[in-house]
């Protein structure tokens, strides 16, 4: 047994365990925490494949930024310690079950058939992913593919994200409301207003 | 012993030794830094500071640590049991882990093995550092929420917003460094800063200036010269990320009692304290690594491996002093000013600076011209930053809602 296998075992148990625990946790903050644990464990498995860049980005973006935002919203809205278990939408559970099964089948297919996804980049057979991560390095290899072959989808995605952010800001902005500008009122102005 | 070496391999043994030494050194440094801070601030406020226990009061921190260790481990009734217990650890561990990519010295050769004085030379060192910084938020956020009381919750909500804002600025401020060095590895970045600025060809042919420009041969080739705007953004964001004055809004003792720390006592409180000071050391060491040549400095043949380590330590202590100086002299920012600085000034400035660096770096102009372009464009950036101030922004008062002329200027 090598160290790599040992680390993979730990990451595997933590990722799966916290993912299952996430499903059964009653508290919204605990759910978020288990998700963070699962994401960090996933980052570990990326590390084991030599994908340092993907691992770092996984932690910065998912564990570091998105989950913190989730927690922020959860805390800002005030968490109820217990969650209502009554389902308001009757079709939601069977739908979720069906879609979940579809997703699992998709992942299983990818895991079996698409294991040497790297061969589409290098033209080699299986095991090319690890070699690719070693030789030009994960950062270089990813940058080359992202900024040459997939440049258009990449830029389209970023344009989409910017459009979404601008859209949210337009929708959330309340013109002329006091609450939007309240923090800016200085004591002198407050007196003026009063 | 040899059986252990055979099983794990020499690389793992070296790694374990490095981890143990770094861990011990960081904790030891923290104890000294706390004493150093109290002494420096006392000096700035014309007091004596700790003086009772040990020479110059050096053992005061140790005594405080022992005191905290033996205090009752108190937990409020409304607290969330497990989260409350995990939070202090979640605050300290990422701070400690951040140090793993910082090279403290040049490579050392023992017999036939060469050991780099860095725990791990990752090819994504900068990103790893940012990742650990972003995980550090959890300690504070969870502590505030798990305490089950109002002030800690307010502190942790403040902290969340603050850290997300300033993390963005910090990440953007490191992009120019990666562009110039052509690598994300901290060891590569330090190596790229070796040597001197070199002969400046810009002044060639001009009688007096040509001779004066010879002085550049003695100036080390650190990134601070060409990348100082990035450094300013990095350091401001770094201070904000450690939650220290003037960015100590999450604990603001005059408004929030002690923010997320309110309900903590004893060893758990000590862990938060330790985490904060380790974070200060890590940010200082990272500033040295990225902008001040890391361990770069004159070495001598006597104990030649030790000099880089000493240079690194001297530079790091200088930045720790800067942290303390900030705390002694700057008042806490108001919350809206904090957000204004982060989102409307630091992030745009960092973005503009990335563009400037990218253009100048790709154009490949001669060194002197490059310097000139850097300075010229930075003036533009500064004008951009200096334009506008929140005090000049007029609020929309209820009376003026009908008029279009008033509002955001």
Image: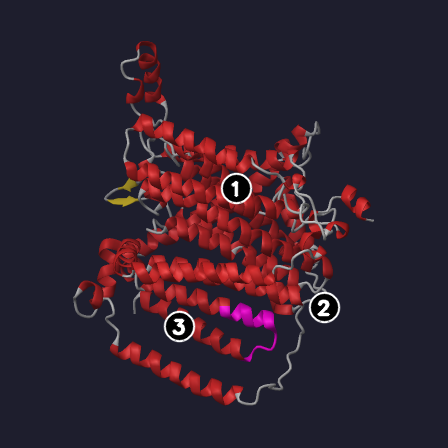
Question: How would you rate the neighbour count of disc 1 (Cα within 10 Å): few for under 14, some for 14-19, many for 20 or more?
Answer: some
Label 3 to label 2, Cα distance in Å? Answer: 34 Å
> Residue at left 35%, top 83%?
A105
Is A73 situated above or below B108? Answer: below
Q: Label 3: chain?
A: A
Q: Which mark is residue B283?
A: none
> How far across and how far down the image is residue B349, in percent?
48, 41
What separation in Å lies between label 1 and label 2 (alpha carbons)?
36 Å
Q: Secondary structure at mark 3?
A: helix
> Where residue A59 appears, x then y in whole percent?
44, 60
Q: Are marks 3 and 2 in contact (CB under 8 Å)?
A: no
Subunit ID for the residue under disc 2: B
x, y percent for residue B39: 63, 33
Residue stretch rendered in magenta on the structure: A24-35
Q: Could you say which is closer to the camera, residue B78 or residue B62?
A: B78
Instruction: Say whether residue B196 is visible.
Output: no
Q: Residues within 10 Å of mark 3 (few under 14, many from 20)?
A: some
Residue wearing tag 3: A12
* Picture residue at 23% right of the left edge, 54% below the top: A136
Residue A113 lies in quadrant: bottom left
Q: Is residue B112 visible?
A: yes
Q: Quadrant of the C terminus of chain B?
A: top right
Q: Kindly identify which residue carries mark 2.
A: B78
Q: Main secondary structure of the magenta part?
A: helix
Residue A90 in the image: above or below residue B209: below
B313 vs B322, nearest the viewer: B322
**Label for residue B29?**
1
Mark 2 surroundings: few (<14), some (14-19) or many (≥20) residues within 10 A: few
């Amino acid at each position: 047994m090598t160290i790599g296998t040992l680390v993979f075992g730990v990451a595997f148990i933590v990722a799966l365990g916290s993912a299952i625990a996430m499903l059964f946790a009653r508290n919204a903050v605990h759910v978020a925490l288990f998700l963070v644990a699962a994401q960090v464990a996933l980052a570990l498995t990326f590390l084991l494949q030599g994908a340092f860049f993907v691992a770092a980005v996984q932690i910065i973006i998912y564990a570091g930024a998105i989950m913190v935002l989730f927690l922020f919203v959860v805390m800002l809205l005030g968490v109820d310690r217990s969650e209502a278990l009554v389902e308001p939408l009757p079709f939601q559970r069977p739908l979720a079950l069906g879609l979940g099964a579809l997703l699992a089948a998709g992942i299983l297919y990818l895991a079996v058939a698409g294991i040497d996804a790297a061969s589409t980049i290098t033209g080699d057979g299986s095991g090319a992913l690890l070699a690719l991560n070693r030789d030009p390095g994960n950062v270089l290899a990813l940058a080359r593919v992202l900024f040459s072959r997939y440049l258009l989808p990449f830029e389209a995605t970023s344009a989409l994200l910017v459009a979404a952010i601008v859209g949210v800001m337009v929708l959330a902005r309340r013109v002329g409301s006091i609450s939007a500008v309240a923090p800016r009122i200085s004591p002198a102005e407050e007196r003026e207003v009063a | 012993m040899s059986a252990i070496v055979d099983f794990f391999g020499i690389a793992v043994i070296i790694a374990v030794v490095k981890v143990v030494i770094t861990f011990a050194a960081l904790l030891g440094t923290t104890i000294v830094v706390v004493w150093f801070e109290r002494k420096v601030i006392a000096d700035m406020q014309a007091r004596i500071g700790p003086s009772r226990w040990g020479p110059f009061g050096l053992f005061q921190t140790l005594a405080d640590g022992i005191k905290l260790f033996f205090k009752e481990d108190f937990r409020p009734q409304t607290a969330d049991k497990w989260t409350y217990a995990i939070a202090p650890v979640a605050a300290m561990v990422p701070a400690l882990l951040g140090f793993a990519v910082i090279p403290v010295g040049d490579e050392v050769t023992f017999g036939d093995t060469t050991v780099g004085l860095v725990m791990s030379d990752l090819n994504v060192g900068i990103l790893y550092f940012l990742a650990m910084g972003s995980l550090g938020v959890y300690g504070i956020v969870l502590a505030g929420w798990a305490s089950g009381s109002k002030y800690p919750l307010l502190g942790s909500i403040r902290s969340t917003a603050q850290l997300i804002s300033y993390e963005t600025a910090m990440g953007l401020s490191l992009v120019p460094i990666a562009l110039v060095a052509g690598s994300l590895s901290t060891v590569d970045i330090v190596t790229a800063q070796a040597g001197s600025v070199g002969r400046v060809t810009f002044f060639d042919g001009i009688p007096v200036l040509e001779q004066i420009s010879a002085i550049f041969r003695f100036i080390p080739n650190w990134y601070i010269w060409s990348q100082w705007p990035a450094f300013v953004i990095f350091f401001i964001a770094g201070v904000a990320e450690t939650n220290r004055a003037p960015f100590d809004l999450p604990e603001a003792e005059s408004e929030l009692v002690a923010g997320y720390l309110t309900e903590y006592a004893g060893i758990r409180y000590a862990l938060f304290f330790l985490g904060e000071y380790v974070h200060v050391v890590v940010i200082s060491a990272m500033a040295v690594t990225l902008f001040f040549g890391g361990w770069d400095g004159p070495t001598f043949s006597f104990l030649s491996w030790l000099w880089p380590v000493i240079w690194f330590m001297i530079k790091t202590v200088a930045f720790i002093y800067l942290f303390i100086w900030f705390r002694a002299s700057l008042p806490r920012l108001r919350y809206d000013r904090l957000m204004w600085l982060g989102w409307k000034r630091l992030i745009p400035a960092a973005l503009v600076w990335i563009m400037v660096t990218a253009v100048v770096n790709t154009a490949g102009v001669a060194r002197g011209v490059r310097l000139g372009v850097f300075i010229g464009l930075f003036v533009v950036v500064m004008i951009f930053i200096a334009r506008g101030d929140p005090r000049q922004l007029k609020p929309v008062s209820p009376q003026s809602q009908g008029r279009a002329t008033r509002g955001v200027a």
